[in-house]
Each structure stands twice: as C-alpha cells, then as structure tokens.
Image (spheres, coloured by chain):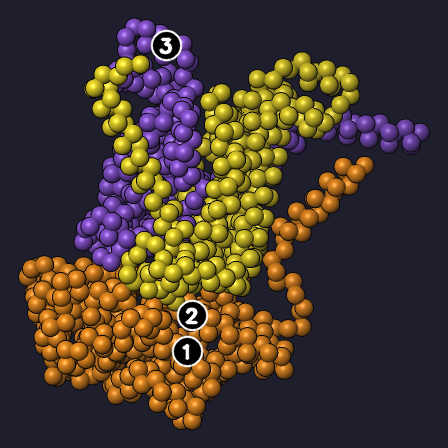
Amino acid sequence: MNDICVFIKLSDVKLNLHRYRAYLYLAPAIVLAALFCWYPAVKGFIESFFTVSHSGTVQGFAGLSNYRTLFSDKAFLNSVSNTLRFIVLFVPANTFLTLLAASLTRRKSRFSFIPEYIFFVPVAVSLSAYSLLFRELFRGKASVINRILGTDFLWINDKSGAMATLVILGIFLDFGLDYILLMSAFRGIDKNIIEAARMDGAGGWRLFFQVELPQIRGTVLATVFLALKDAILISAPIIILTEGGPYRSTETIMFYYYTEAFRSGNRAVQNSMAALVLTIAAVAFAIYSLRRKSR
Amino acid sequence: MIRRPLDQMKFVLRKVVLLLLALIVAFPLFYMFSSSLFSAKDFNKVNLLPAKAVFSNYAKVFGHRYFGSYIINSVGTSVLASVIRTVVIVLASFALTHLSFKGRNLIFSALMLTLFVPQEAVLYQNYRTIASLGLLDTWAGIIATSLFSAAQMILVMGSFMAQDRSSYDAARIDGASDLRYIVSVLVPLSGPAVLTVSIQTLITTFNSYLWPLLVTNKPKTRTIQTGITMLGFAESGDMGAQMASLVLITVPFMIVLAFTKKRIENSLIRR
Amino acid sequence: MIKRLSAFVLVVLVCSALFASGSSEKSEKTTVTIWHSAQGSNAQVFENLAQDFNNGIGKEKNIEIEAIYQGKANDVLTKVNAATGTDSLPDIAMMDATAALDMNNSPYLVTVDKLGIDTSDILECGISSYTSENGLLALPFNASALLYYYNKSLYDSLGLQPPRTLDEMAEVVAKTASKDRSGFAGVPATFELTTLIGAQNGLSYMLNNRNGHDGAATEVLFGKEGTYKAFLEKWKAVYDTGAYNPIASGVTAEFTSGRTAAMLASSSNLASVINSVSGDFEVGVAKVPMVNEKATGGTVISGGALFTFTQSEAVKTVLEYLISPEVQAIWSESTGYVPVNTKSYDTDAYKAFLQKNPLYSVAIKSLLDSNPGLANVWVPSAYSVYYSFQANIVDVLNGKDMDTAVSEMVKTVESAIKAYVSN
C-alpha cells in the first residue's frame, strides 16, 4: 500500500517535471538576464532619483537633483560634446570607407583573395592590441605617421589631433566586421537582377548606385547602427590611448562614467548617467526596429 | 574585348584606390611585425624597418612571468563562456520554439528587453553584484555577465523554427528525450547558426578589455587583453618587447582567419 | 556510458575552474597583498624585493608578500576605490598624493600611527607630506623629486650649464634649439607647480591649511599671493623664445629621441630614461630652475607612499622591511627614487654607489636642501584640476591675458573645493 503511494507520488513528480520542463530549459537564460540586466537596470534607474552614499546605502529621496547636478557639471557636458564630435566624424567616415572597400572587391577575381584578406584581417587584431599600436604610431611629433606623411603634427598630444587619432583607431576596430558584412551582402545579390540591369544597358556607376546599393541597404543600415552604438559607448580605447587627454579633449560619456563611477565613487553621476544611457539606447533601438519592420 | 579609354581609366583608378586602401589598412600590422624586432634606437630614430633584427624581444615576452597565465586565463574564459552561452541559448531557443507553455510570449518579450540594455550602462551595478557574490578574481566573475545574449538567441530561434516540427513529434513518439533530440537532430541541422554563436562568443570574450580589467585584481586571474597593457615593457623603454607581445596574441587569430574566411563568407552570403 | 562519464568529468572541471581563485594555498602562511604602481623595470625591482622578503624574513615568520602591479598610481586609486566595501581591498596599496584626500576620509584606512611603526629615521619632508589632521596617513616609500633633465652632450658641446632660474632657462633653451629640436618640452601641471609655486618666497602654499594637510583646504592662495602669476610671466618668456614645445604628453619620448634638449620629470624616471636613450647621448639632471632669485624653498618631495588597510603584525613586519635602510638603498640604486630612510645614506655600499652614479645624488641633494615645510597639494578632483592647469597655462602661452587666466584658474579650484562633500 505504502509502496504504491510512493510510486504514484514519484510519477506525479516526474509528470510535473515534464510539464514544467520548458521553464527548466529557460531558467538559465532568465536567471542570467534577471541578475545582470533587469535587476541592475531597474536598480540604477530608481537610485538615480535618490541620494546614495559612497558605500551604496540609500540616504533619501532626491527628486531630479542628481540630474540637475549632472547637467550643471561642465566635465559631463564636455564629455557629451566630445562624444557627439566623435560620432559626427566617425560614423560617416567608417561607413564610407568600409563601403568603398567592399564595393571595390565585390566581384570575385583570381587575385581578389589578397585584398579581401587584408580588409578582413583587422577582425583578428584585438582592441587593446590596436590601441597600444596606435599609441606608438601617433605618439607625437617624432612619430611614424609624421615620418610617412612628412608632416609635423602633434597627434595624441594635441586636442584635435587626439580626436583624429581616436577616430582613425575606431575605424580600424570596426573595419573588418563591417567589411565582411558588406562584401558578403554585395555577393549575395541575386545574379539575375544584375544581369537584367546589364541587359538594360546599366553599367559602372549606374549599376552600382541604382541596382546594387539599394539591394544591400538593409546591411548598410545595420552597419551604420553598429557604428553608432560603438561610437556612443566608446570607452576602452580611450582608457588605453589617451586617458581622456590632452586637456579632456577625448573624454567621452562612457569614459567619464568609468572614471566617476570607479575612481571617484560619485554615485549621483554614476546612476543618473546609467539611466540616461539606458534611455538613449532604448530610443535608438526602438527607432532601429521600427525602421526594420517598416521594410 | 575592346575597352574604351574612359573605361580603362576608370579601371586603373579603381585599382589605384584599392591598392591605396589596402596599404593603409595593412600598414599598422606591418609596423607591428617590423617593430617587434626593433631595438630602442630604432624607435628613437622612427625607423620603419629594424637596423638589425632583435629577436630577444620575443624571448623577453616568453620570459615574462605572467604572460603564460594571461594566455591560459583568456583561452580558458573564452572557451568556457562560448560553451556555456551556446548551451544556455540552445536550451532557451528550443523551449521557445518547440514547446508550448503558459507565459511563453511574456518570457520571450522579457528576454528581448535585454537588447535595450547595453552592458556599459549597468557596469557599476554588475561590478557590485559580482563583488558581493564573491566572484572577483575568478573565471566565473569574468564571464558571468556575458553568458546570455538575446541577439544571438534570435539567430538560433530563427534557425530552429526553420526545421521541420514533425521530426520532433516523431522523436517524442519514439521515446527520445528532448536533450537527445536537441543534440542529435536539432543542433546538427542548425549548424551554421549555433557555430556562429559560439565563435562570436569566443572572440568577443577573448577580446573584451574593460570588464576583465574591473573584476580582476590578481595577475593569476587577469586575461591577456588587460594583461598586455600591464606587461611593463613600454614603460621601461622596451617598446620592442611590447610589440612582440602584440604579434604573439594576434598571429593565432590571423591564421585561424585565413582558414575560416571562406566559410564565414559563405554562411553570410547564404542568408 | 563513456559519454556520460566524460560529461560528468567536464562538469567537475568546469566547476573547479570557475571557483579556483588561486588563493587556496596553505593556510598557516599569512599573505600580505600589496598593490603597487611601480612601472616597467621598477616593477621588476619591487617584485624582487618582495621575493627577497619571502625567502628571508618571510620564511622565518611565515609571512608572504604578494606584490601585484595595478597600473599607474591613479589606476591603483581607481582599483582601491572600486574595491572599497568589497572583500578584495589589499592590505597595502602604493599610491601618490592624489589619493591622499580620498584616503584621509576613508573609514578603511589604517594610519601609520595605529600600526605603531617607528618613523624616526624617515625623511622629515616625507613624513610631513603625508601627514594630515588624522595623523600619518601613509608610509613614504617611493619618494622622488622633480628634476631638470637635459641633453648633457649637447649642453657640453655648446659650453652651457643647466639653468638655475627661469630667466636663465629662457636663454639656454633658445641656444639649444635647432630646426628639428626644441630647447624644452612639456607643460607643467599640479605636480610641477607645487615646486615652482611652493619654492617662492622661501615657502608658499597653493591652498590654505598647508595645502590641505591641516584639515581640508577652504581657500585658494596662489591667486592672491601672486605666486601663480609670477610663474606665468617667466614661463611665457621661455615660450616667447620660440624654442619651447608645449606638449602635454609623450614628453619623455621626445627627450629620449633627442627631439627636445630638456624637460622636467620625476627622478623616478632616471633609470628608464637612461635605458631608452641607450647611449645616443649623455643624460644630465639638475635641480629645477627657480622662478626668481627669491624662490629659495627648493623642491617638494613627490612620488608615492604605502597606504595600509589591515592592522596586523604581518603587515607591520612587511612595512618595516620595505623602509629599512638596506631595502631603500637597493630600491634607489635600481630606480632613481630617493631613499626615504636617512640611515641608507650612511651605508658604505650606498655611498660607493653615489660616487659611481652622481646623477642619482641630484634628487637627494635637492630634497635635503629644501624647506621641509613644502607640501604637495591635496585637492579634490585632482585629475581634473591637473588638466585645468595645463589648459590654463597653454591659454596664456597663446596670448590670453594673465590676470584673467589666473582668476579663472582660482575659480576652477575653488569650485572643486566647494563641490567636494566628504561622506
């Protein structure tokens, strides 16, 4: 009798387990998302309206005063304008150059594997490797780049030179991935479409701008958004290359966040900035998905 | 085929631009290789080629007492992260595409919400979480925050949905467990998508800089990307050894790339 | 079966790898963790010193030093601030004056007085530079002095001596410049100004309360005392020679590659500068030029000190070892730092070393000749004040009105002081 009871219960458990197995499979994903994404995002967002001490205890409601502090902070505003400057310089340059490289190699030929490999190989070079390399290449007046160009520029020792170096570094960091995406997109275009256009007498520039480019606009858009995301969030290359200098000319939003949150332990700035970045990311992402849906 | 002069000019122009662009892209790498054989004098004189190749730069890197453990930590964490993330994503994608249960849409949307949260925005809070879990200076701490990615889950779900549902029902009737079906049918059929996820994770974990910098305080747990900025060669005037260390962490990936380039391209073109 | 078994093994491996942190060694030994900021070859020297301890005193007393490089001094500060409140604070951290203010307010700091270490042999200026109203915050360890580095081969060939004052410097700089070489490079910031301003009128402070050491600074002095302007006037004259290259970073590389004939840098760079020059020319060092004849205060002690977060006998033993005359002598000989233990100067080995390497004695002499009242500046947001000074000086060089620039700079520092709320 007892034995039967146990048997029934066991099978119950098994049955239940079976019924709930979907949750079991999803559990790791949910736990990870909750612990390292939802929880910190919500906590940071809420804490941005409170006064939080250096050690992390909540001391009282602050309303919008954290945001007011942030927006009256000259260093923060400076970091915003630096980031905007970086975006304006980097995104178009990056898109143009990767698109140029991809379009020049979009037709396969006997030796095309050589430029293809060269354009693709930046993928193999890590962020810290490129940053350390550029720190040497652009190290000031007595630098390799000046020697090659025959110039006498200060590069990372100069306000605009440091920003220029950072933009060039940014392009190298994104080049490989963007190139391979765009190049594959070109080659993935249906051959019949191109043939049909050729029959119609389209060639050269016209074929490129009126037929091929529109065909891959989805991929182009994706690389633009990737570049935009990287530009808004750039911080690690700055930590290695310029440390925000000279004269704070390369302090970007995320670099400023990093130094305030971790070096100065400034909770007001850290939480309100985190909340702002979240909002910007949400808006940018929403725009992107809406645009994708409308196509 | 007779080319008109204008076409010929365009052709030459294209090749010149191509050559120029290729030279620019390749130059930093060329300099990295070349300067890894430099002496201090070559750096001071801003040479492009070493006056005399100094191979001892490489010996210095191999002789560095932490270089080896940096590499082991990087390879270890990136392989672990890659395996775990792939498993997490495959299981979740399977549940979301092959099973019906209460709250399916809710869970799916909630997971999709993570796309809106860049890791950078929750950097500090996550650091505190890892610290309070006692995971600073562990491999678990280095990889914990990167074990799930909604973007990659979409990719895998797409591939799973493209598979024939009836084969799953048949497998169930035959008494095969879910895991068995996933391992022996579903994953092999979705090879490219699953492979993409694991390779991407491998590379991004190997290359990540800021997070490992924050959560490691000991050289024994540091990864190569943060370690390479702390080797101390550049600071003591041994720039050549610094460059040699860059060569050493780049070359393996260049070789892998040379062999997998075709496959990566094809998987992208097919989509 | 085999598959299951191997899966099990994999799981065990993964778990053990995940939670292995390398700290699970024998428990009888007390490990003292030190986060240091000694760069490059200096790091090697420091880690060797730790090794020597582990093989000697440490073995006897069952103590082991774990010396960990964490980047530059301000990277160590970042790490320490981030680790505050977690269980990963080190026992000892090597940081510099920019950390002093944060540490002065940290509930986790253990002052040297509490540790009960005898500091009677330590350089007087070293002690006073890390003393606040709460006592001696940190034990001076890697002490240095600002020096005037110059290309001695070039100076000798032109029959020039390193300048004693900024007036002389303007002349010398003009004479040593050529088409592809500047006479001097670099823009002073807080670190250089503590000496260039501090030495004026025998002894001057940039902020009240002895530059913030006797309680937080509440007032800016360099404006109303005219010391900053006095410096700017002379510095502009150097710039107006046209032979001065005002770059803010990469100065050492300019100097070692022979592209500038002189620079101001810490004595702690001496060994690595000589190494980088690798015999291309002879390196010379001299005392920092004075702003004017009345600026007789000398050079402020700079460099770093050891901040402690654990109160234990083991930590005390380690600290006493690190400031012992022998260790300080070795440390100095292989880096260029100044021994903080005055007993080091009396050892025969160190005397012989200085005889052979006269460059290393310049920093010592300039510290011993200085007014020990000189103190480095403890200012909130040290990092941004640093940049503000450089930007302000460059503005003046480019023609900005000096009085406007001074009052702007005063305002910047005042607002940094006001914004700082200690918690």
Q: CA distance from mark 1 to mark 2?
A: 9 Å
Q: CA distance from mark 3 to mark 1?
A: 73 Å
Nearest to the observer: residue A45 or residue A286: A286
Q: Colour of chain B?
A: yellow
Q: Is residue C39 above or below residue A31?
A: below
Nearest to the observer: residue A248 or residue A40: A248
**Is the C-beta separation of discs 1 and 2 under 8 Å?**
yes
Disc number at residue C41? 2
Disc number at residue A195? 3
Residue A50, horizontal then vertical, whole percent: 38, 48
* Rendered residue at 93%/29% (across/down): A1
* Rendered residue at 10%/71% (across/down): C174
Q: Amino acid at mark 1?
A: Ser
Disc 1 element: helix
| Co-location on one chain, circles 3 and 2 | no
Mark 3 or mark 2, which is nearer to you?
3
Mark 3 or mark 1, which is nearer to you?
3
Disc number at residue C229? none
Residue C390, horizontal then vertical, whole percent: 20, 62
